[in-house]
């Protein structure tokens, strides 16, 4: 691989997509300019160009947006994957504006990702003939551009899309006011998702709606008519759809007349259907229509789901809609307990956390002799302060290593999401005050907290009390990455960061926290999680989520047990060579499949006494092979098996065409006598592996 190209790739990884990097790409490919375009249904959501455009007074963003419908080359690149023209001036698909700018040659490559994006090479000064090797090199760079774009999409999602989820109360309760209210928020969703049409059905409340960007046949109905029965969203509701799905016109036109209608009347070719499910019950279905084949990213799915869920939950919890249909609500206590249970089921390390924090906060509040009503608000806020963590993925919520910047941003949003969820408890007294305490419980008096960076004077008294209780309990609770601190040590840590807290509250809380620590532990042990769940949770925590094998932590525990018993064994390390290149060349999906097939092949070693097969790293496996000192035939059989591992893995793929030409494994064997702990044996195994890699 060209060293300059590798340097560009490294820069994209560390710096993202900058003008300077695009300049370097243009220089490498010997063209005048380079551009990156991200689109949703040809609505350009991100355009970045090299400095050539600015120097020559070319507003590339404005040109792309104004000419999106005429830009046939972009459409072809998105649908066909690649568009190359060495003589743009004679190209029948040429855009008039770019033609006038004297563009001579163009190469547009669709970036292989879960969203629609292209990278372009533009030559204005002279004709450039793009060869196959140019395209292959551009594909290599596109892999890194895709990762940088994913980060841009996610930040936009956090900063610009989540705030749109705010939904205002309905001012009046007559049907016309409700209709206008629904139209306003559905129109907002239509615009935000860049869809050309949207349909929404919520049969429990007899709500049926359809909107399009040209406002043709828009309606909101509170009756189920024959027109409703023909809506795709209603059909999916009737079929009890339980997961997002996509309909493409060409695949569906022969058996669904509603898709035929969407094609003929609105030119819709691609439809995303999202079901909203609560406690296993299908509540509503929302559908988004797109004119062009719109590749939907995980952020599109998340955003559209969150919007539809927010709207659905708001309707279900707003008293005005009871005029449309009577509803049955659970008691306030049951709802709160359900949310606490949901959090604890996600993360057993926080078992009892909400109850303990609420207990500490109530004790602190009582000592300050504040009003009983505020003490109650603080206690309820303590129970509910972390419910937003329901939305945080497991691999982030329970990560044992340091969080990345993006992962930390996701964790920080739990305060806002908790606030949003608490706002749905319409039966709660003092709802706004409780929600405000929940939102601010991670604010710090020096302004370094989140989500709003408030100073002490702007943080509510309840949130300042809750912050002290929350930090103390967090420090005195064990986490995957550390043991619990003793109560006295936790207080010393908090004293070292005293600027984070209200001084008066913190100083008044020290004795209360220490004196009530044991009682809080007892309260936490009375968590509502069924005891059996802890066992199941721990069992699954010991498994790798891709392969189902033991995790690294579980393997190390088993190695230490074998050493303690002084049992003879060999420790094997099997590493897939050049896994990074395999992922780049064949894609991450193939890489995952290769790991799974390798696991399946290695399971054949069980007949030779192999135990504790584990996925030890991104591309490596380890297992233990016990042996008796006087008998080592099984070890010889294992060695023979592993020498043919590449053949066994290839056989697992059977007749599939896509397979690495020279799949190789690095295999290392370490005897139990070479180390006194799992860490030491693994260190030695890695040293052997490095030596083999260096020699080869």
Image (spheres, rainbow, N blue to C red):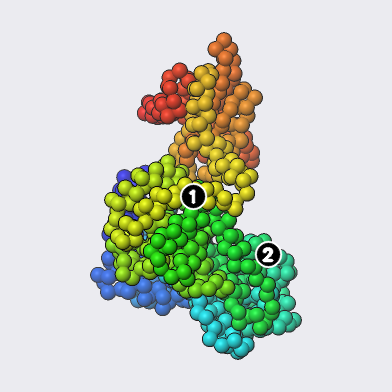
Please name the residue shown 40% across and 54% down the image: 512
Q: In the rendered view, would you say 69 is above or below 240? A: below
Q: Nearer the viewer, residue 326 or 196?
A: 326
| Left or right for 486, reference 324 | left
Q: Secondary structure at mark 1?
A: helix
Q: Nearer the viewer, residue 260 or 94?
A: 260
What quarter of the picture does the N terminus occupy? Answer: top left
Q: Position of residue 117 (x, y in %)?
A: 45, 63
Q: Which residue is mark 2?
A: 281
Residue 519 badge: 1
Seen from this angle, which residue lies furthest top?
A: 630
What quarter of the picture does the C terminus occupy? Answer: top left
Please name the residue shown 63% across and 64% down the image: 277
Please name the residue shown 47% across and 25% down the image: 668
Which comes before the other along the chain, label 2 or label 1?
Answer: 2
Viewer can see residue 25: no
Please name the residue shown 52% across and 26% down the image: 561
Q: Label 2 crowding class (10 Å Cα cut-off): few <14, some 14-19, many 20+?
A: few
Residue 128 sits in which quadrant? bottom left
Q: In the rendered view, would you say 643 is above or below 515? A: above
Q: Secondary structure at mark 2?
A: strand
Q: Position of residue 374 (x, y in %)?
A: 45, 69
Q: Position of residue 515 (x, y in %)?
A: 41, 50
Tell me, yes or no, whether the two marked residues, 2 and 1, touch with CB atoms within 8 Å: no
| Left or right for 570, reference 692 | right
Viewer can see residue 579: yes
Q: Position of residue 302 (x, y in %)?
A: 53, 63
């Amino acid at each position: 691989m060209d060293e300059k190209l590798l340097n560009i790739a490294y820069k994209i990884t560390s710096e993202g997509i900058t003008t300077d990097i695009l300049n370097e790409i243009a220089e490498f490919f010997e063209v005048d300019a380079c551009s990156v375009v991200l689109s949703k249904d040809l609505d350009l959501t991100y355009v970045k160009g090299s400095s050539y455009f600015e120097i020559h007074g070319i507003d590339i963003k404005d040109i792309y947006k104004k000419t999106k419908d005429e830009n046939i080359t972009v459409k072809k690149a998105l649908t066909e994957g690649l568009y190359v023209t060495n003589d743009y001036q004679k190209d029948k698909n040429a855009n008039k504006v770019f033609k006038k700018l004297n563009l001579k040659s163009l190469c547009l490559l669709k970036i292989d990702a879960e969203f629609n994006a292209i990278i372009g090479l533009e030559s204005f000064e002279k004709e450039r003939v793009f060869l196959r090797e140019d395209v292959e090199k551009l594909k290599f760079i596109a892999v890194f551009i895709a990762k940088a774009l994913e980060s841009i999409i996610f930040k936009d999602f956090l900063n610009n899309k989540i705030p749109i989820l705010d939904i205002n109360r309905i001012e009046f309760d007559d049907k016309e006011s409700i209709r206008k209210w629904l139209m306003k928020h559905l129109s907002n969703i239509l615009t935000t998702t860049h869809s050309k049409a949207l349909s929404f059905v919520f049969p429990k409340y007899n709500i049926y709606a359809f909107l399009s960007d040209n406002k043709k046949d828009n309606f909101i109905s509170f009756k189920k008519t024959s027109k409703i029965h023909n809506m795709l969203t209603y059909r999916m509701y009737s079929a009890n759809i339980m997961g997002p799905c996509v309909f493409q016109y060409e695949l569906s036109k022969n058996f669904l007349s509603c898709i035929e209608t969407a094609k003929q009347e609105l030119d819709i070719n691609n439809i995303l259907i999202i079901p909203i499910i609560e406690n296993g019950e299908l509540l509503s279905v929302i559908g988004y229509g797109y004119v062009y084949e719109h590749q939907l990213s995980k952020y599109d799915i998340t955003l559209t789901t969150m919007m539809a869920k927010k709207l659905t939950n708001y309707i279900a919890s707003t008293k005005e809609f009871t005029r449309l249909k009577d509803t049955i609500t659970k008691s306030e206590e049951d709802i709160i307990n359900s949310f606490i249970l949901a959090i604890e089921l996600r993360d057993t390390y926080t078992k009892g956390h909400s109850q303990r924090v609420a207990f500490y906060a109530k004790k602190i509040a009582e000592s300050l002799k504040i009003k009983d009503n505020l003490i109650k608000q603080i206690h309820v806020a303590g129970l509910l302060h972390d419910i937003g963590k329901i939305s945080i993925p497991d691999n982030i919520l329970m990560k044992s290593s340091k969080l990345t910047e993006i992962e930390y941003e996701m964790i920080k949003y739990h305060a806002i999401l908790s606030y949003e969820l608490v706002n749905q408890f319409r039966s709660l007294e003092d709802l706004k005050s409780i929600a405000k305490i929940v939102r601010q419980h991670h604010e710090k008096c020096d302004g370094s907290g989140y989500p709003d960076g408030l100073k002490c004077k702007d943080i509510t008294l309840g949130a300042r009390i809750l912050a002290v209780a929350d930090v103390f309990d967090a420090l005195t609770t064990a986490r995957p990455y550390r043991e619990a601190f003793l109560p006295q040590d936790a207080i010393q840590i908090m004293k070292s960061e005293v600027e984070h807290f209200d001084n008066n509250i913190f100083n008044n809380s020290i004795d209360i926290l220490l004196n009530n620590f044991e009682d809080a532990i007892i309260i936490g042990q009375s968590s509502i999680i069924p005891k059996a769940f802890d066992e199941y949770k721990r069992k699954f925590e010991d498994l790798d989520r891709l392969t189902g094998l033991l995790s690294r932590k579980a393997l190390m525990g088993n190695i230490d047990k074998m050493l303690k018993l002084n049992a003879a064994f060999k420790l094997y390390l099997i590493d897939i060579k050049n896994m990074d290149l395999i992922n780049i060349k064949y894609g991450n999906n193939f890489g995952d499949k290769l790991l799974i097939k390798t696991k399946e092949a290695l399971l054949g070693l069980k007949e030779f006494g192999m135990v504790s097969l584990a996925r030890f790293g991104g591309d490596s496996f380890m297992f233990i092979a016990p042996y008796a000192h006087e008998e080592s035939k099984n070890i010889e059989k294992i060695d023979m098996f592993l020498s043919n591992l590449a053949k066994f893995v290839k056989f697992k793929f059977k007749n599939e065409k896509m397979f690495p030409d020279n799949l190789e494994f690095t295999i290392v064997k370490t005897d139990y006598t070479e180390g006194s702990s799992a860490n030491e044996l693994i260190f030695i195994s890695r040293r052997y592996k490095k030596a083999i890699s260096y020699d080869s």
